[in-house]
Image (tube, rainbow, N blue to C red):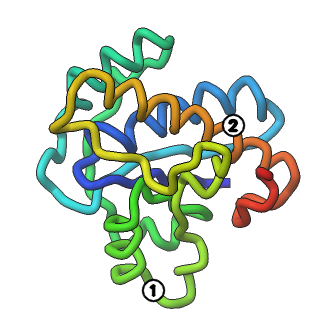
């Protein structure tokens, strides 16, 4: 299973999702072969490391983002990945517009896997305060656990397996 997490610039939400899911999946899905990556729909930060505040918040919870670098979603990603998870509706729409028709069913919102969170989008913490980065981590941890449950149940393309 190959999973791609996507936000706008690939320096806050999607690299956090990549690192958090990688850590949780290593513990909960040790018997699954997974490829995990992240990208952005815009090229504002290509080649840059994750935002310092993102990395610091993640490190406080034991997640390491130090080796990650921002990249843009490439046309090949739509064929390469089995599941493409957008952090918000704006990026979801962008991905759906760019994706070939035959693979659009692979694209969904990441928080579909965390219905208990009471939110449908992971908010962008970039222009907010420190609490925004902690809130993003809370949401991503919940969705990562839900995605693990869906993968264990054999229904990764459906959030139903997470409920």
> As displayed, is residue 47 above or below residue 86?
above
Q: Mark 1 points at which residue?
A: 100
Query: Is residue 23 toward the left or the right of residue 48 in the image?
Result: right
N-term-proximal mark, 1 vs 2: 1
Crowd rating for badge 1 (residues with CA inside 10 Å; few <14, some 14–19, many 20+): few
The residue furthest left is 44
Q: Where is residue 50 in the image (x, y as percent from the top left)?
A: 26, 31
The residue furthest right is 153
- Tell me which corner region of the image, top left, top right, bottom left or bottom right, holds residue 2: bottom right
> Measuring 69% from the left and 27% from the top, which residue is drawn there?
26
Q: Is mark 2 on a helix, strand or loop?
A: helix
Query: Is residue 42 toward the left or the right of residue 149 in the image?
Result: left
> As displayed, is residue 99 above or below residue 77?
below
Q: Position of residue 78 (x, y in %)?
A: 47, 71
> Measuring 87% from the left and 52% from the top, which residue is drawn there?
153
Mark 1–mark 2 Cα distance, whole angstroms, equals 29 Å
Q: Mark 2 points at which residue?
A: 145
Q: Where is residue 141 in the image (x, y as percent from the top left)?
A: 57, 32
The residue furthest front is 118
- Tell me which corner region of the image, top left, top right, bottom left or bottom right, holds residue 34: top right
Mark 1 vs mark 2: give the one in front.
Answer: 2
């Amino acid at each position: 299973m190959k999973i791609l997490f996507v936000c706008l610039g690939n320096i806050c939400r999607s690299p956090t999702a990549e690192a958090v899911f990688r850590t949780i999946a290593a513990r909960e899905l040790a018997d699954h072969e997974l490829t995990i990556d992240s990208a952005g729909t815009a090229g504002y930060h290509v080649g840059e490391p994750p935002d310092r505040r993102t990395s610091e918040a993640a490190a406080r919870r034991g997640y390491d983002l130090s080796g990650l670098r921002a990249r843009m979603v490439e046309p090949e990603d739509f064929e390469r990945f089995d599941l493409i998870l957008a952090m918000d509706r704006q990026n979801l729409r962008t991905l759906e517009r760019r994706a070939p028709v035959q693979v659009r069913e692979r694209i969904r919102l990441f928080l579909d896997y965390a219905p208990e969170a009471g939110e449908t989008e992971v908010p962008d913490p970039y222009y907010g305060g420190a609490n925004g980065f902690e809130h993003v981590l809370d949401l991503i941890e919940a969705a990562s656990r839900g995605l693990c449950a869906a993968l264990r149940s054999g229904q990764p393309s459906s959030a139903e397996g997470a409920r």
